[in-house]
Image: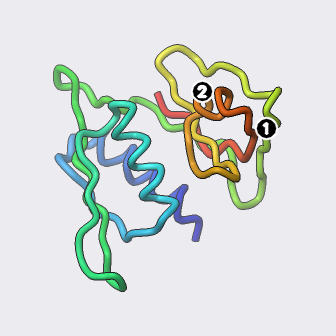
């Protein structure tokens, strides 16, 4: 199972169904992506609950005037197709969109990666 892709699709479906929050099994990659979404204003709050072997992420979804803050999540890299970008190939995302990239310095947005001068695997685009 592709954990990151499954998490992002559950997040998108929950926001379209106007759920208040979702819970998802903890993993470092999913937690990093959720924290980026919180920082960029797509979700309200991200918290990890439980013990070490049974941690669960709780993500409170955000809505702007009864519309979901997350309108679209486009998975770029999948287990069958990996999309890598060099530091010079990172381009600006569409308006109001955030690209999430996995680099050797951790998971970050494409704008942060461009500032730090690192490339990596483009995971998704959120708008």
Q: Residue at x 46, y 68 (%)?
A: 27
Q: Is residue 31 left or right of residue 38?
A: right
Left/right placement of residue 127 relative to residue 19 reads right
Q: Is residue 113 left or right of residue 81?
A: left
Measured in 3D between alpha carbons, the distance from the residue under mark 1 to the one under mark 2, in whole angstroms, is: 13 Å
Residue sitting at 37 percent across and 70 percent down? 25
Residue drawn at point x = 37 percent, y = 33 percent = 70
**Crowding at label 2, few (<14), some or many (≥20) Cα neighbours within 10 Å?**
some
**For residue 1, which quarter of the picture?**
bottom right
**99 and 79: which is toward the camera:** 99
Residue 37, placed above or below residue 11: above
Q: Nearer the viewer, residue 33 or 63?
A: 33
**Which residue sits furthest bottom?**
53
- In the picture, the disc for residue 85 is 1
Q: Secondary structure at mark 2?
A: helix
Q: Earlier in the sequence, mark 1 or mark 2?
A: 1
Image position, residue 2 (x, y; %): 59, 65
Q: How many marks?
A: 2
Q: Position of residue 110 (x, y in %)?
A: 62, 32
SS state under label 1: strand
Q: Which of 4 and 37 lies nearest the eye of the viewer?
A: 37
Q: Nearer the viewer, mark 1 or mark 2?
A: 2
Q: Is residue 64 above or below residue 10?
A: above
Q: How is the image coloured?
A: rainbow
Horizontal side of residue 68 vs 8, given as left or right: left
Residue 111 - label: 2
In the depicted structure, whether residue 32 falls above or below residue 114: below
At horizontal 39% and vertical 43% (from top left) the residue drawn is: 12
């Amino acid at each position: 199972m592709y954990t990151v892709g499954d998490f992002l699709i559950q997040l998108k479906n929950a926001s379209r169904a106007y759920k208040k929050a979702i819970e998802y099994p903890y993993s470092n990659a999913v937690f990093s992506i959720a924290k980026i979404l919180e920082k960029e204003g797509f979700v309200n709050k991200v918290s990890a609950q439980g013990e070490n072997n049974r941690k669960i992420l709780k993500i409170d979804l955000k809505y702007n005037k009864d519309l979901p803050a997350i309108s679209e999540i486009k998975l770029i890299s999948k287990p069958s197709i990996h999309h890598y970008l060099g530091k010079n190939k990172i381009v600006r995302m569409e308006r109001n969109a955030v690209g999430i990239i996995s680099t050797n310095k951790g998971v970050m947005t494409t704008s942060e990666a461009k500032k730090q001068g690192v490339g990596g695997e483009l995971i998704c685009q959120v708008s």
